Image (tube, rainbow, N blue to C red):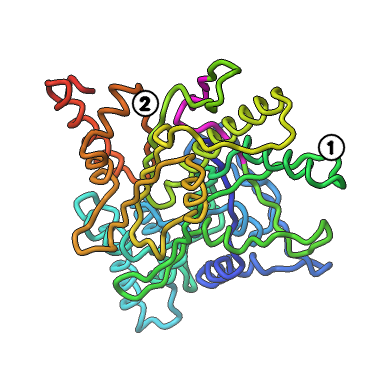
C-alpha cells in the first residue's frame, strides 16, 4: 500500500508550444544564447522573508527554457484567480491612431472575459472553457491575443508570480518487496553465477495513459502519464537518451497489513494459513495497491512454508497449495475484460495455486452494468460480507474512485445492519 511520488518534467514539444505564445520579449529570453552558444542564464532575485507560502521559490539561476521544462507546471489548468490576475496584463499598442479605439475596445473585451471567467457566479462558464476543454496556460495565452502580442504587459516577473510549480504525482505501488526478495533468492539458488552479495531493488506502477479528445475536438494528454510513457530503460550508464527519474516512496494509508500466520504442530502436514483473512476491492488502476498487498501476503506465506520444508530436511522443495483461498479474496472491477483486465495471467496463476479467490465485475460487458459493490454483496448467496467480517474477523481494503469506495462501504454497512438487527449507524 505504499505510494511512489514521481516528479515529471515537460516535453520539448509542450515547452516550445508555451514559448510560442509568450510575448515576443519573453520568447526572446527563452531562446537567447550567449557567446558560447549556450542558452542565456537568468538571475532571479527575491526576498524569501517577505514571501508567504503561495509564492514559488524558483531557482535563482537558470535558463528560462530550463525553468519551463523542469520547474513550472505549464501543462496545468489555470485556476479562476489566475484568470483574474491575467486580465491585468492585457494590452495592445497600435502604431495607427485610426485603429487605436478598436484596439482598446478589443483589449477591454478580453479583460472583461477573463474577469467573468474568474467570477464564482460564472462557475459554469469556467467549467466549459477550462475544465471540460482541458485548456492549459498555453491555450489561454493563445486565445487571448492581448496577452501575447506586441504591447502586452506580461513581464517575466509577472509570469513567475502566476505559474504554478511542478509538483510530484502520486501512484500506488503495485509490487511487493518481499516477493521481489523471494524471487531474487530463488534465482540465486538456481544460477551459481549470481553473487550472493548482489542485491536489486525495483518497484512497479500501474499507470493509465491519460489522453483523449474534448467535445470540441481538442486533443489533450496527462503530464505525468505521458512523461512515464516516454521513459525507456537505459542500455548502460553512457546512454545519452536516459532520464534521471526523480521518485520518492512514502507509506500509504492502509495501515498495518495483517501478515500473521497460524502454524500448527510441526507434525501436522497442513500448511499454515493467515490468522486474519482480507478482502481487497480494486477498480481500474486501483488494482495496484491490491496487487501489492496480495503479493506481500503470498511471499510471507511462501517463505514460511520454505522454512518448514527446510527444517524437515526435505530434499525437494514442493510448494503445497494454500489451504483456504477465502483468506485472500480479490474483487476487481473494470469496464471491459478484453481491454482493462490488468494482471489477468497473474491472477489466473494464483487461482490455480489456491492462493486467492477472484470475483470480477466487468461493467460494460453486458447490457446491465455490474459493479464491484454488487458482486461483493451477492457473493456466496449474499453471505460473504457477514461471514468474512463477523465470523472470521476479516479486514477489507478498498482502492479506486471515491464513488466506488462509498458504494462498497454502503453495501457492507447494509449487510452488517441486517445481520446485527440494527441501523447502519450502529453497524458503523
| Residue ID for mark 2 | 394
Q: Is residue 253 magenta?
A: yes
Q: In the rendered structure, which disc, 1 or 2, sits on the residue that comes first in sequence?
A: 1
Q: Residue furthest top?
A: 265
Name the residue located 37 percent from the left edge and 48 percent from the top edge: 332
Q: Is residue 18 above or below residue 376?
A: below
Q: Which quadrant is home to the C terminus?
A: top left
| Residue ID for mark 1 | 196
How many residues crowd around disc 1 within 10 Å: few (fewer than 14), some, or many (20 or more)? few
Which element is circle 1 on? loop
How many residues crowd around disc 2 within 10 Å: few (fewer than 14), some, or many (20 or more)? some
Relative side of 254 to 370, left or right: right
Part of the protein shown in magenta? 248-262
Q: Is residue 144 above or below residue 6?
A: below
Residue 260: percent from the left, percent from the top?
A: 52, 21
Q: How many marks?
A: 2
Circle on res. 76: none
Residue 392: percent from the left, percent from the top?
A: 34, 23
Name the residue located 78 percent from the left edge and 65 percent from the top edge: 38
Relative side of 285 to 176, left or right: left
Asked if one can make out residue 13 in the rendered structure from this viewpoint, the answer is yes
Q: Is residue 57 magenta?
A: no
Residue sitting nearer the eye, 382 or 54? 382
Name the residue located 29 percent from the left edge and 46 percent from the top edge: 372
Our reading of the magenta stretch's main secondary structure is loop
Amino acid at each position: 500500500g505504499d505510494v511512489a511520488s514521481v516528479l515529471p518534467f515537460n516535453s520539448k514539444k509542450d515547452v516550445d508550444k508555451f514559448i510560442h505564445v509568450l510575448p515576443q520579449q519573453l520568447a526572446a529570453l527563452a531562446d537567447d544564447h550567449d557567446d558560447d552558444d549556450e542558452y542565456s542564464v537568468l538571475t532571479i532575485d527575491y526576498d524569501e522573508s517577505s514571501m508567504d507560502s503561495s509564492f514559488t521559490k524558483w531557482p535563482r539561476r537558470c535558463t528560462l527554457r530550463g525553468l519551463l521544462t523542469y520547474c513550472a507546471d505549464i501543462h496545468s489548468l489555470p485556476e479562476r484567480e489566475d484568470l483574474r490576475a491575467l486580465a491585468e496584463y492585457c494590452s495592445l499598442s497600435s502604431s495607427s491612431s485610426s485603429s487605436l479605439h478598436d484596439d482598446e475596445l478589443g483589449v477591454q473585451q478580453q479583460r472583461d472575459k477573463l474577469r467573468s471567467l474568474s467570477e464564482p457566479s460564472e462557475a459554469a462558464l469556467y467549467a466549459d472553457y477550462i475544465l471540460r476543454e482541458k485548456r492549459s496556460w498555453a491555450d489561454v495565452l493563445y486565445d487571448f491575443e492581448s496577452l501575447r502580442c506586441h504591447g502586452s504587459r506580461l513581464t517575466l516577473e509577472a509570469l513567475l508570480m502566476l505559474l504554478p510549480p511542478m509538483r510530484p504525482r502520486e501512484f500506488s505501488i503495485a509490487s511487493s518487496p518481499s516477493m521481489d526478495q523471494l524471487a531474487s533468492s530463488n534465482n540465486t539458488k538456481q544460477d551459481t553465477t549470481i553473487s550472493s552479495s548482489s542485491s536489486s531493488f525495483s518497484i512497479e506502477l500501474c499507470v493509465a495513459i491519460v489522453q483523449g479528445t474534448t467535445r470540441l475536438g481538442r486533443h489533450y494528454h496527462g503530464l505525468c502519464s505521458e512523461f512515464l510513457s516516454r521513459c525507456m530503460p537505459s542500455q548502460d550508464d553512457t546512454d545519452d537518451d536516459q532520464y534521471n527519474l526523480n521518485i520518492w516512496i512514502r507509506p500509504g494509508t492502509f495501515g498495518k497489513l495483517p501478515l500473521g500466520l497460524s502454524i500448527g504442530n510441526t507434525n501436522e502436514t497442513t500448511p499454515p494459513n493467515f490468522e486474519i483473512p482480507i478482502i481487497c476491492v480494486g477498480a481500474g488502476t486501483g488494482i495496484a495497491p491490491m496487487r501489492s498487498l496480495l503479493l506481500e501476503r503470498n511471499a510471507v506465506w511462501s517463505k514460511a512454508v520454505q522454512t518448514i520444508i527446510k527444517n524437515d530436511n526435505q530434499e525437494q522443495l514442493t510448494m503445497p497449495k494454500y489451504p483456504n483461498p477465502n483468506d485472500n479474496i480479490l474483487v476487481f472491477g473494470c469496464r471491459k475484460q478484453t481491454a482493462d483486465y490488468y494482471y489477468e495471467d497473474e491472477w489466473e496463476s494464483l487461482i490455480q495455486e489456491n492462493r486467492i479467490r477472484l470475483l470480477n465485475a466487468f461493467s460494460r460487458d453486458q447490457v446491465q452494468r455490474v459493479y464491484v459493490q454488487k458482486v461483493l454483496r451477492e457473493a456466496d448467496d449474499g453471505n460473504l460480507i457477514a461471514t468474512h467480517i463477523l465470523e472470521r474477523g476479516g479486514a477489507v481494503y478498498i482502492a479506486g474512485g471515491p464513488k466506488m469506495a462509498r458504494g462498497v462501504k454502503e453495501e457492507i454497512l447494509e449487510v452488517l445492519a441486517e445481520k446485527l438487527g440494527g441501523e447502519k449507524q450502529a453497524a458503523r
